[in-house]
Amino acid sequence: MKKEKVFILHNLEDLKNPVLELLSIVRGGLAEQGVIIFLNGELASGKTAFVQEFAYQVGIESRVQSPTFTLMKSYSVDSELIPELYKIVHIDAYRLEPHHKETLSVNNFLEESGTLVFIEWPTSIDLDPDIAYANTDFYVVNENLRRIVIRSKIEL
């Protein structure tokens, strides 16, 4: 049974709490295999901002941009906060063309320990939901309020 934790965000600074929660969740899995996180939610609900905050918290200094038009971006990580993490891959499948599904080879990332993969719009890729280490759901409550729900395979 998956565990669940809910966060209410009033501004971008509030992203730090769910990001740190997710960091604690993925830490154990990264030493053994790649970890995949599904990011679910409507447009402009905060998925990319979440990945940007995550990257900032683990010390990525380069600008993290949405891979909407490139489909996938990869970032090297050398973090004292989470030394098990070597690489972040950010996939945005919103504009995914059918012929791109095979080229992504998402399952191959599971074989790369130290790799954390964020997938926006995972339903566009027809992935087995069980490969997700955690699902992070983003909800727009109103113009200034977001709700994030993290559901994980491990105890929160």
Image: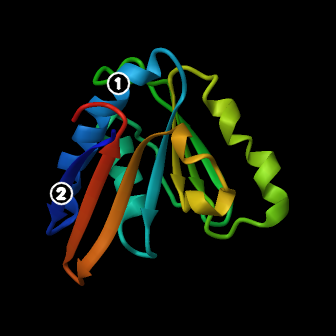
> Is 132 displayed left or right of 25 in the figure?
right
Q: Amino acid at mark 1?
A: Arg
Hey, which residue is sitting farthest right in the picture?
Answer: 99
Which residue position holds label 1?
27
Determine crowd level at label 1: few under 14, some 14-19, many 20+ residues with C-alpha closer than 10 A: some
Q: Quadrant of residue 27?
A: top left
Location of residue 54 in the rendering, given as x and y in whole percent from the top left corner:
35, 44
What's the coloring here? rainbow
> Is 97 displayed left or right of 45 in the figure?
right
Query: Who's the residue at 31% across and 71% down the image?
Result: 139
Q: Nearer the viewer, residue 62 or 14?
A: 14
Location of residue 29 in the rendering, given as x and y in whole percent from the top left corner:
42, 23
Q: Nearer the viewer, residue 84 or 124?
A: 124
Secondary structure of residue under mark 1: helix
Q: Which mark is residue 65?
A: none
Q: Nearer the viewer, residue 141 or 128?
A: 128
Find the distance from the CA under tag 1 to the CA under tag 2: 20 Å
Give the quadrant of the N terminus: top left
Location of residue 26 in the rendering, given as x and y in whole percent from the top left corner:
37, 30
